[in-house]
Image: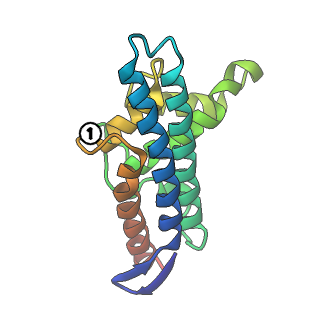
Amino acid sequence: MLLLSKDEIIDLKIDELSDLLILLDSKLEYLIDQANAQLDADSSGIFDRAEYFIGVGFVAMQQYIADTMQYSTVRKSEALNLGSVTSQGVTHISVINSAANWWKHESEWEWYGESGIGNKTYFSICNIVDPINYPLSNVLAFLVAEKTFCLSSAIPILEQWRDHLVIYTQEHT
């Protein structure tokens, strides 16, 4: 991200992220079409495959968050509390971060008996959606609300957060 003036931002990372999310969206669209054409799409694993691609999308969004914060003096805990807030009182950006952590670490929790990141992420997701049945699909649907169900519909949330981060950084330096 490059800040040119107080009101103008050039953000090359958002363009890279958008390109990736559009690719993932095309795969999701294909899977949704497959699901609609089958009588029992759940048992064929289509929804599990969609969860996988949505998880990749959330991790890419998390990488964007990290890239954007890279040159900021704002601590991660502060940055995740910036931007728009859900009806549950948590920021959309922290939900994206938790969804990415869910996808990356969920399979480790039982295997290693770890509870640190797992419990925090689990409870963050539980406050938003049912974590048992396709939690990432449900988180995405929650985040994009009335917009098209696709990963790229989350880009405005990230851009709004980025703008809040820039303002917060300017006010606190």
Give x and y (percent) for residue 99. 51, 38
Q: Is residue 98 above or below residue 64?
A: above
The residue depicted at 47 percent of the width and 32 percent of the height is: 136
| Number of marks in picture | 1
The residue depicted at 46 percent of the width and 74 percent of the height is: 169
Q: Is residue 89 above or below residue 123?
A: below
Q: Is residue 44 above or below residue 163?
A: above
Of 106 and 150, the residue lying toward us: 150
Q: Extreme bottom residue here? A: 5
Give x and y (percent) for residue 15. 48, 67
The residue depicted at 46 percent of the width and 82 percent of the height is: 3
The reply to whether residue 8 is in sight is: yes
Residue bearing the label numbered 1: 87
**Amino acid type at image mark 1:** Ser
The reply to whether residue 127 is in sight is: no
Of 161 and 159, the residue lying toward us: 159
Hey, which quadrant is residue 6 in on the image? Answer: bottom left
Give x and y (percent) for residue 49. 55, 28
In the rendered view, does 24 fall on the left or right side of 84? right
In the rendered view, does 126 fall on the left or right side of 108? left
- Asked which secondary structure carries label 1, the reply is loop
Give x and y (percent) for residue 26. 45, 44
**How packed is label 1: few (under 14 Cα within 10 Å), some, or many (20 or more)?**
few
Q: Extreme front residue here? A: 37
